[in-house]
Image (cartoon, helix red, strand yellow):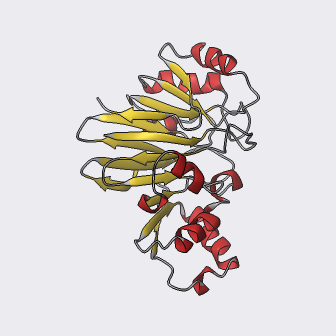
Amino acid sequence: MAKIVFLGTASAIADQTHDNTHLLIQNEDRIVLVDCGGNPGPRLIRTGINPDRITDLLLTHFHPDHVAGAPLWLMNLWLQGRTQTLTVHGLEHTIQRLQAMLDLYEWGKWPDFFPVIFKIIPEDGNSLVIQDSDLVVTASPVKHLLPTIGIRIEIPLSGASAAYSSDTEPCDAVISLAEDVDVLIHEASGASMGHSSAQQAGEIARKSGARSLVLIHYSPSTPEDELIHAAKEAYPGPVSIARDFDEFSLRS
């Protein structure tokens, strides 16, 4: 059974119970880590997932709360004896900067480092990122302060689907990614340049025809009922708040 696991749900400023936003897409054969602001290793262990089982790292954009932990996590995997290949996906803007960051740590000199394959996601929209018999992930550029992607997740065997906005202002790309999905996971850090409020997330969910809305990347200091109420002003469907370690099953 495929599922999404929320490892962190906070916007840029985390607290003791809300890590910065990152999540897992998991099925029987593949586990994709989406973003890596801190070191996800201990959180993966808490969820019962061996970090060595992660097959892919998908980075939505190059802001510290989404990518700064990647070098430490890769070093931890190496020190723990990983040997299998890890595939890292991202826009060219993101991948180039991640590689430069790794070069600062001289990772090329770390002996017997496991293979890492970097795959550039095109910026032309609806780009295929991952395609397996039971997992399809596509990406489109969204509207943030630097090049950023949102993603659509589809489970062909069950027909289930989800979309994740990443950090973005309201834009047509998210509406397209979220068209008729079972769940739209949308940021709610507040209406500002490059970001969206909970009410705006509700508007996107309504326009896209999403069957449910989960708010993520919010300020932990904002009351949850306030966020839900704001989203429900624009969206008639079910609205919930993502919390760290919550799981969402992707099934029809």
Residue at the spot x=42%, y=23% of the render? 209
Nearer to the camera, 146 or 218: 218
Query: Could you say where residue 18 lies in the image, as x and y percent from the top left?
Result: 67, 38
Frontmost residue, 165 versus 251: 251
Q: Position of residue 221 (x, y in %)?
A: 76, 29
Q: Nearer the viewer, residue 160 or 176?
A: 160
- Determine the residue positioned at 53% across, 73% down: 78
Residue displayed at 49% across by 21% down: 206
Q: How many marks?
A: 0
The percent position of residue 112, horizontal first and vertical second, equals 50, 84
Position of the C terminus, as image quadrant, is top left
Where's residue 195, x and y in %? 67, 37
Whether residue 15 sits left or right of residue 51 in the image: it is: right
- Where is residue 21, by image quadrant? top right
Q: Looking at the picture, does residue 217 appear above or below residue 129? A: above
When the figure is inspected, residue 95 is found, relative to residue 252, above or below; the finding is: below
Q: Quadrant of the N terminus?
A: top left
Is residue 244 visible in this depiction of the protein? yes
